[in-house]
Image: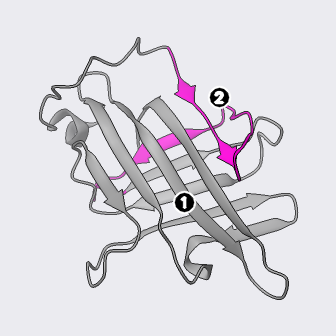
Amino acid sequence: MLPLLGAAPKSSFAPLRSETVRRLTLRIDGKTVPADTISSRFFLSADRALRLNIVRADDPDGQGLNIIIDRFPIETGTYKFQEILSGRNRDASYRYGNTSAYSKSCSDNPGVVTITGVNSDRHWLRGTYRCQVCEVGRGARRFTLEGEFEYPVEKE
C-alpha cells in the first residue's frame, strides 16, 4: 500500500501494538481534549510529505489540527518546525468553531514532531507532537497543542 514507508529501515525500538489499535491524544494548553480516532488521519504523499490530521471528538467533521512535514525521511527522529534556511515546509494549522490559528502567525514557532517508532510492514508511526499556533489580528490568542500517537499512515 505504501511503498515509501515499506522502504524505511527496520526500527530497533519496541514493536508497535496491534494494527487495529489507534492511540491518539490531544492536549490544548495542557487540557486534555478527546481526539476522534475515526476521523483523524495520517497521510504520506508520493513526494514524502507527511500530514498529520488530528480531529477533535466533539467536532468530527471539523478540520482540527493539521501538521505538515515535507521531505519526511521515513525514519525515527525529531523534526523541528523552524530550521533556518532548511527550505523545508513544517507548519501547523488549527481550526475549531470560529477559531483559526496558524503556526506561521506566531513570532516564535518551537513546533516539533518526534517519531519514536516506524513499522514499515504495517504502515504505522509512533511518536509525539508539540506546536504553537496563533490567531491572526487584534487580541490574537496563542495555543499550545501537544500529544502522542501510535497511528496508521495512509497513502495520499
Identify the image quadrant of residue 83: bottom left
User: Does label 1 or label 2 sit earlier along the sequence?
Assistant: 2
> Dot 2: few (<14), some (14–19), or many (≥20) neighbours within 10 Å?
few
Q: Is residue 87 magenta?
A: no
Q: Quadrant of the N terminus?
A: top left
> Dot 1: few (<14), some (14–19), or many (≥20) neighbours within 10 Å?
many
Measure the C-alpha gap from mark 1 to mark 2.
22 Å
Please say whether residue 156 is visible from this viewpoint: no
Left or right, 66 with reference to 58: left
Indicate the amino acid at tag 1: Cys
Q: Please name the residue that numbered disc 1 is placed on.
A: 131
The span picked out in magenta is: 21-49
| 138 lies above or below 146 | below
Q: Secondary structure at mark 2?
A: loop
Q: Nearer the viewer, mark 1 or mark 2?
A: 1
Query: How is the protein colored in the picture?
Result: one colour
For the image, the number of numbered tags is: 2
Which residue is at the front of the view, 45 or 119? 119
Please say whether residue 96 is visible from this viewpoint: yes
Q: Tell me where residue 31 appears, x and y as whole percent.
A: 75, 43
- Mark number displayed over residue 38: 2
Which residue is at the front of the view, 152 or 133? 133
Q: Residue furthest bottom?
A: 138
Indicate the amino acid at tag 2: Ile
Q: Tell me where residue 38 appears, x and y as whole percent.
A: 65, 28
The residue located at (48%, 48%) in the rendering is 129
| 123 lies above or below 100 | above
The residue located at (48%, 42%) in the rendering is 42
